[in-house]
Image: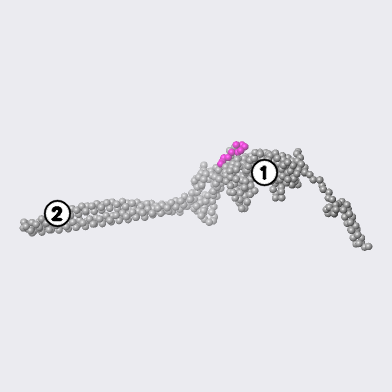
Amino acid sequence: MNVKTIQYVLVITVSMSLCLSGCDNGKTLNGQPALGSTPVEKPAGPTAVEVVPVEAIEYSEKIDLPGSSVHGMETSQLFSRVGGYVQDINSVDGKEIDIGSLVKKNMPLAVIAIPELQDELTEKVAKVELAKSEVEQADAAITQSEALIKQRMSEVKQANSQKAEKQALLGLQKIKYQRIQLLVKNGSIGKEISDEAEFAVKAAQSALESVAADVKAAESNVAAAQAGKVKAIADKASATANLKVATAIAKRAQTMVGFATIRAPFDGIITKRYVDHGAFVRPATSSSGVMPLFEVSRIDKVRVVVSVPNTHAARVLEGQKVMFYNIGGLPGVGVEGTISRSSNTLDTKSRMMRADIEFKNPVQGVSSKEKLNLKPGMYGTVSVRVKDWKNLPVVPVSALQFDELEQPYVMVVSGKTCHKRPVTIVFNNAKTVGITADIKVGEQIVLNPAGQLQDGQEIVAITE
């Protein structure tokens, strides 16, 4: 026999021995019961576990947000509306306005020299005065035309009176003429007297016609005077419109001159100064090279800007109480406040939500009760009080387990069985865990179940 044949025989022999050995134990090689054998059952019973009661503590849930910074309630950079050279920088309390200067609203800070604007204003003001004089002249013309109308009306009245007198005289002359004609027919008087009477009638008729012409002339004069008044009124309307235009132009020029004085927009402090005497300032309307003159911040009231990460954004709300502490420059000082407003949106770049807390300077420290001022640029930590519990359930950290979805749970003992109870973690200090769930203080939970227990499994509870 060769070597390969000998190896083959040995393998078969060992295999048969193992098979016979397995058959003797009632099982096949793979651990399954052998044919015709009876399986041996292990004794089953409840699992012994250690249990502890759920305890309770008084607890305030807080979220600490470091890196919160103090900003002025309002901060503005002041630009010039017009271009020119810095003529003057004003003073406060005998000192030239510079960083740290306290200023009041509308206080002049600097003056820009713009001679051409001043000249333009002088011209526009002169045109306003000229327009005013034209309006006054139009007023005088109206008054004069009204007086002339009265005079012409008087002349019409006088002419009508004379016309009435001439009409009466004509009537009298006609009556005389008729009487004389009767006497001439009777032969009482001569024809020459009749001729004289006829001439007198004609003379009276001519006088009446002359007066009637005077009446028409006087009425024409009245119409002319009334037309003069209408023209004077129109002239006044035109002069008034010109005055309004001139006034608007002058007002604009005055506004432009006013822009040459840079004023504080509110009570605050100068935080930056960018110009000195003689510096050329470009107008803010220019597209390039525009530089501010000053930066002013309002510090009687400040805001602490908080960046809230997305993990806490849903729980930080307007109106919640906060503590601002670990303030750089103010060691050991903490001040209490309230979240004044929240953006309620997350920044697309930082994935942070902004919240603001307003403080009115000076603020009072919580511990020292000392009055102090929060200054823009300071930073510290904001602790937000999310919720307060008088009886928050707490369990040992070893009692907490997580399922395949990473949902935390504890095993609660009910009689001789245990049941899975999902919970929400409030805090975890590596020793105990504060939880919220449908769980009562005093209930028994399994300590250190190590995930081997099933929901509804029978147990034997062992207390410490």
Please give the name of the residue rendered at 56% of the width and 41% of the height, measured from the top-left corner.
361
Name the residue that disc number 2 marks: 172
Q: Nearer the viewer, residue 243 or 24?
A: 24
Residue 364, magenta (yes or no): yes
Hey, what amino acid is under mark 1?
Ala
The x and y percentages for residue 119 are 43, 53
Residue type highlighted by circle 2: Leu
Residue furthest front in the image: 36
Tell me if I can see residue 292 in this picture.
Answer: yes
Residues under labels 2 and 1: Cα distance? 131 Å
Taking the image as shown, residue 387 lies to the left or right of residue 128, namely right
The residue range painted magenta reads 360-369
Residue 39 coordinates in the image, percent (x, y): 83, 50
Sequence-first tag of 2 and 1: 2
- Quarter assignment of residue 62: top right
Mark 1 and mark 2 in contact (Cβ < 8 Å)? no
Tally of marks: 2
Magenta stretch, overall SS: loop
**Residue 299 percent location from the top left of the image:** 55, 43
**Which quarter shows the N terminus?**
bottom right
| Crowding at mark 2 (Cα within 10 Å: few <14, some 14-19, many 20+) | some
For disc 1, the neighbor class at 10 Å (few under 14, some 14 to 19, many from 20) is: few
- Spot the residue most to the bottom: 2
What residue sits right under mark 1 in the picture?
437
User: Which mark is nearer the camera, 2 or 1?
Assistant: 1
Residue at horizontal 11%, vertical 56%? 178
The residue at 90%/60% (across/down) is 8
Q: Nearer the viewer, residue 123 or 311?
A: 311
Q: Is residue 287 above or below residue 457?
A: below
Left/right of residue 94 with respect to residue 414 in the rendered view: left
